[in-house]
Image (tube, rainbow, N blue to C red):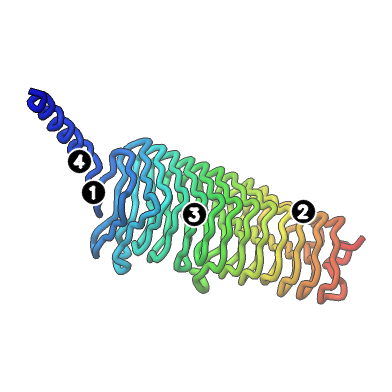
Amino acid sequence: MGLRLYAPAVALIVLLGAGAGSASAAIGCGDVITEDTKLKKDIACELGETGLEIDGDGITLNLDGHTIQGDDADNAMVAVSTSGDEDVVVRNGTLRGFGRSLVASGGAGLLVDRLNIRRQENTPIQLTAYNGAKVKRSRIKGNGIAGVLVDGSEGVTVNGNKLTKAGIEFMSGSDHTAAENSITKTGGFALSARPGIAFVGVEGGLARGNQVAETMQAGIAVSGGHDIDVIGNDVRDSELSNISVQGGAVATLVEKNETHGGFFGISADDNALALIRRNTVLEAINDGIRNVEETNPVIRNTANRNGDYGIDSASGALSRDNVAKNNVSPDQCFPSSACNQ
């Protein structure tokens, strides 16, 4: 009698267990993720296969230390994509071997956290019209083009990442921040050369506390737009200016930065309006600070051991309380009244 009572109960337990297991079916290339998902193993995609698409608000894709691997030969494929969604999270794993690793458009609130991105043909992370996104604590190894490309978005923050052969580029939009990133060896040549951090036509932005070195263009570049603050960065050995303000940029603040090497330490030209204040500029190939605009104040900077003038500023510009020593030009600054007064 006891056996007859217990047998259905055992069968019910077995059936419940089978149902629970089927809820975590295997995830594969080309799948659409519509709920929170944690990978159980690596995913390898063949030629012509895309990775995963996220469809829905508030979804978290946790790679859980696993890899989504592309074919390495198909630059049209994307590892992870989301379009029109809000508050999506992609975290904790590796994306490699795709044309682009993460593409997001037309949404808001994306969080990219602790990703390891490498071996892709095009831009690793591309955000288009995606507002309030955050990219943080990730390692991105590119192939010389932009590592994080932000276009037509608002309020994007790129913070605490390590980028090699890849930079951060904000193209239009507003209120963007690049902070506490390490960027080395952006690539390209001539017109295709890439900066370390760029604000192009951006309305309101901040570059703070970044370490930028050996870029093929400017280390930090501001072109057009207005109200960009470049504060407290360490920028070294850029092929052009370590920090460049140009293209009619308005109300740019360049303050408390330290530069080493580069063709110029800091330059402001092409009708750019900037306040250059309390920077330390060392060992540039040419002038430490080159300012060609009479409207730009150059105040309380230190410029030492540069290849020409410590400070070369437009004659009518307000230049005061600057110190320049051991620069190649005997006058140290142009005009001579721009420093050591």
Is 188 situated left or right of 304 in this image?
A: left
Q: CA distance from mark 3 to mark 2?
A: 32 Å
Residue 209 drawn at (x, y percent): 65, 53
- Residue occupying image coordinates x 57% and y 62%: 183
Residue 107 drawn at (x, y percent): 39, 40
On the rendered image, what quadrant is the N terminus found in? Answer: top left
Circle 4 Cα neighbour tier, 10 Å, few/some/many (<14 / 14–19 / ≥20): few
Q: Is disc 1 placed on a helix, strand or loop?
A: loop
In the image shown, does 304 or 334 lie closer to the viewer?
304
Where is residue 67, by image quadrant? bottom left
Closer to the eye: label 4 or 2:
4
Residue type at tag 3: Ser
Residue position for label 1: 26
Q: Earlier in the sequence, mark 1 or mark 3?
A: 1
- Residue occupying image coordinates x 31% and y 56%: 42
Residue position for label 4: 22
In the image shown, does 295 or 102 lie closer to the viewer?
102
Residue position for label 2: 277
- Residue occupying image coordinates x 74% and y 71%: 283
Q: Earlier in the sequence, mark 3 or mark 4?
A: 4
Q: CA distance from mark 1 to mark 4?
A: 9 Å
Residue position for label 3: 138
Residue type at tag 2: Arg
Q: Earlier in the sequence, mark 2 or mark 1?
A: 1
Residue type at tag 4: Ser
Q: CA distance from mark 4 to mark 2?
A: 63 Å
Q: CA distance from mark 3 to mark 4?
A: 33 Å
C-beta proximity under 8 Å, tags 2 and 1: no
